[in-house]
Amino acid sequence: MLISVKGLDDERYERPLRLIANLFFEETEIDMGGDDGSLEVVFTLTGETDVKAKAVLTIKESGEQFVAHYEKRITADQEKEYFKSLKNVVSHVYLHVLHEYTGIVQKWGILTGIRPTKLLHRQNQAGVPTEVAHRQLQENYLMTAEKTDLMQRILERQLAIVPDLYDLKKEVSIYIGIPFCPTKCAYCTFPAFAIQGKQERVSSFLSGLHFEMEAIGRWLKEKGVRITTVYYGGGTPTAITAEEMDELYELMYQVFPDVEKIREITVEAGRPDTITQAKLDVLKKWKIDRISINPQSYTQETLKAIGRHHTVEETIDKYHLARENGMNNINMDLIIGLPGEGCEEFKHSLDETEKLMPESLTVHTLSFKRASEMTQNKEKYKVADRSEVEQMMGMAERWTKDHGYVPYYLYRQKNILGNLENVGYCMPGQESIYNIVIMEEVQTIIGIGCGAASKFIDPNTGKIEHFANPKDPKTYNERFEEYTNKKIAILNELFK
């Protein structure tokens, strides 16, 4: 979809207009000032303080028009803040006119960011009453009461499980990335290299990972910085051997400070085909009982289509094996909108989940990530339409509520089906602290390993700096010392 936009001279409008248009159409392009689009939107802005905006959308082929109006008082003094407010006005009238044209209601309004609950936390920290905060979010972003209510429930759960959530800036969490999987899923863009036949590369990677852990652990001890949580992700951290896992966790206890006082250690064992008795013995040995076992779907044809080479039965069997071996906090993931799946298949997945009742269930909505195999070959992967995707999300919301689960974190992604969200549900008291701190960006996350992203948060200003290790194991193996030293230099600036 190509949309011609007129009346706005500033190129800074292009990106927000494109992101909002992508909520309604696939792969939108914005032509600022051009005439080639199948749709043309002409903006008229008048006034400097009391700004009035008008948007006229014209269908080029038929000449049919749709009109929207919006006005807002802008009191910002600085140019940057003034433009931000002006962009908000433009976004409002733009969303309205696209709604008039398509008939599609956007429950998240003009919001395209991935962490909406941060907005509510900000209001809560400032002491804004709940009703006022909700009203402001609904007015500023055009989100519905349904979404602000969901955000409120999540905020309350997060503060119940982490009462000191706003005071964690002087601690850190650690993410340890293991970039190997049995196979690569069609929707995946994480660092995940098929491990078969790559033992030499795995060994080299683990040497670099051990170096990073030792260096970061040394820095933490020297500075007296405590660790809140440790999260082993990837890839699939259980794709390496039991012996390699054992060495990794032993090193963690040796080099990280006060491991016994870390609030939570999680290991993603997401691929059931990587779980063995020997690996469960290792987890139990090092007192790790929080893991993920991710079915994604309980329909075998779907698993085959997305490149997961395990069976439905294997998921169920490995879940029971983990339970028998003392895994007391198991998360499972389901994905709404996988190729070929509709309400019937999703109901089957919920019915199978009911037989297991994991402590937490994360419900993802399929997102077409730019670099994934699924996005690059969309014609091969037919997915449900917006209406059916919304029905499936409704099914998940009702099912979790009926079975005693509560929502405790959410995030959104670009190109997510139905402009919906990913929601983590759990039994009360079983929330993942790591998921909360990374989504709400309340503390520094130090990423260690191939493809691991660090997020450095200034304890005083809250300013965020991103730093990513290379995704390719070969590049990582060649330069892990350089990346480790760069991270420590940043940490030294933050924790003086």
Image: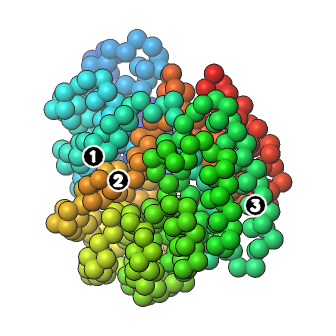
Relative to residue 310, is residue 41 drawn left or right? left
Q: Residues within 10 Å of mark 1 (few under 14, many from 20)?
A: many
Residue 33 in view of the camera: no
Q: Secondary structure at mark 1?
A: helix
Quadrant of the image occupied by residue 357: bottom left
Q: Residue at x 47, y 16 (%)?
A: 79
- Between 59 and 281, the one lying in front of the other is 281
Q: Residues within 10 Å of mark 3 (few under 14, many from 20)?
A: many
Q: Residue at x 66, y 25 (%)?
A: 493
- x and y percent of residue 496 in the render? 63, 22
Q: The residue under label 1 is which amino acid type?
A: Arg
Q: Residue at x 58, y 69 (%)?
A: 282
Question: Are dots 1 and 3 in contact, CB under 8 Å?
Answer: no
Which residue is disc 2 drawn over?
Answer: 431
Q: The residue under label 3 is which amino acid type?
A: Phe
Which residue is disc 1 drawn over?
Answer: 157
Q: The residue under label 2 is which amino acid type?
A: Glu
Q: Residue furthest right?
A: 478
Which sits earlier in the primary sequence, circle 2 or circle 1? 1
Question: Are dots 2 and 1 in contact, CB under 8 Å?
Answer: yes
- C-alpha gap between disc 3 and disc 2: 31 Å
Relative to residue 393, is residue 174 drawn left or right? right
Quadrant of the image occupied by residue 365: bottom left
